[in-house]
Amino acid sequence: MTQTISIPRTLANRLLTQAQFSPDAEICGLIAGDSKNKYRVYPIDNIADRPNCVFEMDPQQQIDAFKNIRQAQQNLFAIYHSHPTSEAIPSARDLHDSAYNEALNIIISLNTKGVLDMRGYFFQQGKAETVELIIE
Ligand SMILES: [Zn+2]
């Protein structure tokens, strides 16, 4: 059975806007959440050598984001990144590099012009399990 996860429309729009502003490089970041369904987005610089098709989060920014998330008494809700020219399907590299198995992975694709294509996955032992994202 496919798991469903709801995310607020404002959050989805924010991720899409960030991705649209970066048509040549993947964007990435963390999303913190808590039991009151409050979310906070932490955009992180993509420092990959080939940012058009790979993302690698700036390590210091990532550490700072986790510190802020803890201080705000929130948890890591999701890791997001964009695919400027390909579908919102995890690459082999995405699966290989994923370090947080408990977090939702959100991929935003700009491949389909004008259409919001945002998909969610859990990565488990090198496999992607699709999550149905309900945007409300
Ligand atoms: Zn990817």
Image (cartoon, helix red, strand yellow):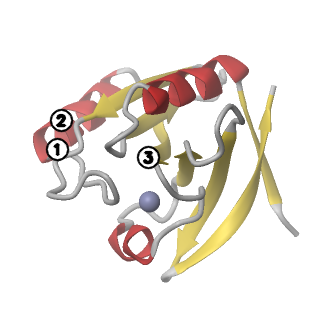
Which one is in front, 94 or 76? Answer: 94
Q: Which circle marks residue 58 in the picture?
A: 1
Graded by Cα atoms within 10 Å as few (under 14), some (14 to 19) or many (20 or more), the crowding at tag 2 reads: some
Task: Assess whether mark 1 and mark 2 are in contact (beta carbons under 8 angstroms).
Answer: yes
**Is the residue 102 above or below the residue 58 in the image?**
below
**Is the residue 101 above or below the residue 63 in the image?**
below
Mark 2 secondary-structure assignment: helix
Quickly name the residue at label 2.
Answer: 61
Graded by Cα atoms within 10 Å as few (under 14), some (14 to 19) or many (20 or more), the crowding at tag 1 reads: some
Q: How many marks?
A: 3
User: Picture coordinates of residue 63 (x, y %)?
Assistant: 18, 40
**Is the residue 11 above or below the residue 95 in the image?**
above
User: Picture coordinates of residue 30 (x, y %)?
Assistant: 40, 38
The residue at the point 48 percent across, 29 percent down is 20
Q: Earlier in the sequence, mark 3 or mark 1?
A: 1
Classify mark 3 as within 8 Å of ligand 1 or not, answering yes or no. yes
